[in-house]
Image: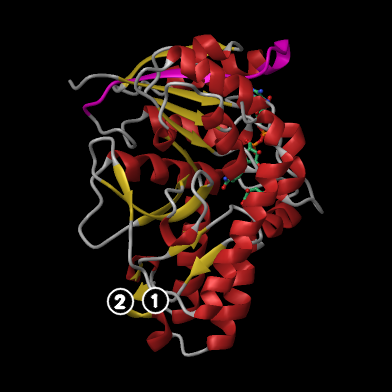
Amino acid sequence: MATPVTVAVTGAAGQIGYSLLFRLASGETFGPDRPVRLKLLDLPIPEVLRACEGVAMELSDCGFPTLLDIEVTADPNVAFDGVNWAILVGAKPRSKGMERGDLIRENGPIFTGQGRALARGAADVRAMVVGNPCNTNCLIAAANCDGVPGDRFSAMTRLDQNRAVAQLAAKAGVTNAEISHVTIWGNHSATQYPDFENARIGGQPVSSVIKDADWLQGDFIKTVQQRGAAIIAARGKSSAASAASSAIDHVMSFEAKTPAGQWFSAAVRSDGSYGVPEGLYFSFPVRSDGAGGYEIVQGLQMSDWAKGKLQATVDELISEREVVSDLLG
Ligand code: NAD
Ligand code: LMR
């Protein structure tokens, strides 16, 4: 058996937690030979912790050969002690009529304390933020996590990538498997730019297969940008199973070496690539080396129209950063 991986999940009593934890434990994410230790963190409220205990009981009842142990705690210092992955889900979801950015002052402070707890406990950690607004929460956590490099933090835009893949496949009348090279640029918000100019369908440029430019520049982008709100309108609750599934994709993509010529989307610390101000957590095309490192894919071409979209999401992230400037350590 390989060295165990220790994974903390915050918001473990919540709806994403319930879809996520079983797939982390089962061997699907880290492989059938990698033992998994799970740490479940939620709020210090008796009924919430009782719900976490119930989830832990169910995890135990699955009898996964890969699951070594499960700890339930309300103390971030306990949860993050010695973790290799910290999956920061615990935060309030938006409700109907809200934008994700409306949560910023409510959820932002969660990530100052969690950033500090990560700094104390985690020598070799990768932290991913799911709780919204996830790019700026990630910025807050990283800024409060002295000693852990900013490139160990990322935020999830993989759900947006997966949504874009499904929309392109449906429009082209092909399977999801034929869609590749989709990039989400920027914020996990209604300003994100789902890039079809560099995406491919069956290896061909999207515009050579989908000849409806109005749809690509209009309904396609709007549908992906607004999909979270559409799910809330339909379900009365924000996306959960699709979010958990995309979180698994995110972790697996960082754990594996990205196949040559491919990439995936994740919000990572900008190093100034594509003119995005350094330090923002911005969704880019990313390639992992499978050994703890990654690079932002360089050289993608963009039309002037696409550059305008990129700038809009940069501007939004700059204004979110201003709103939380007091939380940045
Ligand atoms: P939920 O309300 O079902 O669960 C959230 C859980 O977090 C609750 O159990 C709550 O007690 C816990 N929590 C709150 N504050 C905490 C803290 N300080 N420490 C630990 N736990 C805490 O919500 P959900 O549907 O699971 O969604 C969680 C977050 O994920 C929301 O902010 C939602 O908007 C976001 N989300 C992001 C994406 C994405 O693509 N990035 C997708 C879906 C949802
Ligand atoms: C999503 O994209 O489904 C989540 O970020 C939830 C939301 O508020 O849209």
Instruction: State the residue in front, 93 or 289.
Output: 289
87 in magenta = no
Residue on which the image places disc 2: 202
Q: Which mark is residue 106?
A: none
Where residue 302 sits in the image (x, y, percent)?
44, 75
Earlier in the chain: of badge 2 and badge 1, it is 1
Image quarter of residue 180 = bottom left
* Region of the chain picked out in magenta, as a range: 33-48
Q: Secondary structure at mark 2?
A: loop
Residue on which the image places disc 1: 174
Residue displayed at 63% across by 64% down: 312
Residue displayed at 79% across by 50% down: 98
Tell me if residue 232 can be seen: yes
Q: Is residue 131 above or below residue 157?
A: above
Q: Is residue 74 above or below residue 311?
A: above
Q: Secondary structure at mark 1?
A: loop
